[in-house]
Image (cartoon, rainbow, N blue to C red):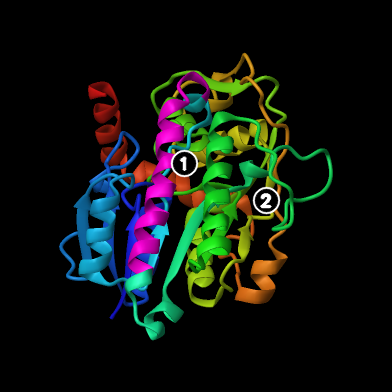
Amino acid sequence: MKKLLVTGAAGFIGSSFVRIALKQAYEIIVLDKLTYAGDLSNLSELLDQKQIHFVQGDIADRALVKKLLTEHQPQALINFAAESHVDNSISGPLPFIETNIRGVFELLEASREYFQTLQESKKQSFRFLQVSTDEVYGELGDTGYFTENSNYSPNSPYSASKASGDLLVRAWHHTYGLPTITTNCSNNYGPRQYPEKLIPLMIQNALSEKPLPVYGTGQNIRDWIYVDDHSRGILLALEKGRVGETYCFGGRSERTNLQVVHCLCEALEKLRPRSQGKYKDLIQFVTDRAGHDFRYAINDDKAQNELGFKREFRQFEEGLLATVEWYLQNSRWLDAIKEKRKKK
């Protein structure tokens, strides 16, 4: 059975990837620190399967990572572990430096030490895959798209820390010959996303009759990809991607933040109408985020042409409706997350 060591797999995107990989007969070793955004409830129905093994730990613990690599002999290490909320990086950047830079360094060194011990045939099949973001590329104007050849130009502590980790991955490939692949994606949405991010925050606030805060005038533009589509892309990059290459995954679904919130309100009106007034009445414009990039958008032709990447949800609105339905059907998940937030 093919084995993968997957870090940060109790988080939003990582837990989606685990579900996709298990269906493809992979055995998964999960390493997760279980910080505030990582929760075992994201994997709860999977943990009793023989193909999944959970270990609580820090990616910056090189000895632990090396031990897991040596004991389990996985064909790849896939790094989802990251501090990822831009607002948090502005108010407190240190955890982002610790996880997104130092953590990646320790993963790379553990992987390099392990890689050097492998027989040549196993070296040929081993991969280190770094999951990154389109925010490392900085800000787009009104036109154009990010591609794998776009220059890195990060503008927030979060994106700067992710860019730093990506550059370490590149250096470990070119200097030490570690077989690495990097993926960059646009904004993800879907089930089990921690409710500090736009879509789950708005759903939670709307259901609680709280204001729906929108930065500035709500005209900042993001490209949105359904999380399972992104996860399938990552698995394709692992299985078919060329060593040393980068692959971008986008949704081809650019929307302003205000359009996203309006779509959410419409979906909620359809599935659970508000008793008094409309959900849109709860929208409240707030002071814009410091250094708020105006637009991100990805051209993922390379992934489509080289890997055969396709999206299940071609229309953002379809994926969003499925997302809202999931949150409405899994209110206990949201309640548990809210309780966890109070304790933190």
From the viewer's perspective, is 7 left or right of 247?
left
- Judge whether residue 18 can be spotted in this image: no
For the point 66% across and 23% down, which residue is it? Answer: 291
Mark 1 crowdedness (10 Å alpha carbons): few <14, some 14-19, many ≥20: many
- Residue at the bottom extreme? 121
The range drawn in magenta is 90-115
* Residue 96 part of the magenta segment: yes
Q: Quadrant of residue 292?
A: top right
What kind of element bears circle 2? loop
Q: At which x and y percent is residue 315?
A: 64, 56
Q: Nearer the viewer, residue 164 or 33?
A: 164
Residue 101 got which mark? 1
Q: At which x and y percent is residue 19?
A: 35, 63
Q: Amino acid at mark 1?
A: Ile
Please name the residue that numbered disc 2 is placed on.
253
First in sequence, mark 2 or 1: give its number.
Answer: 1
In the rendered image, the vertical position of residue 14 relative to residue 153, given as above or below: below
What kind of element bears circle 1? helix
For the point 32% across and 73% down, which residue is it? Answer: 117
- How many numbered dots are placed on residues in this image? 2
Q: Nearer the viewer, residue 335 or 168?
A: 168
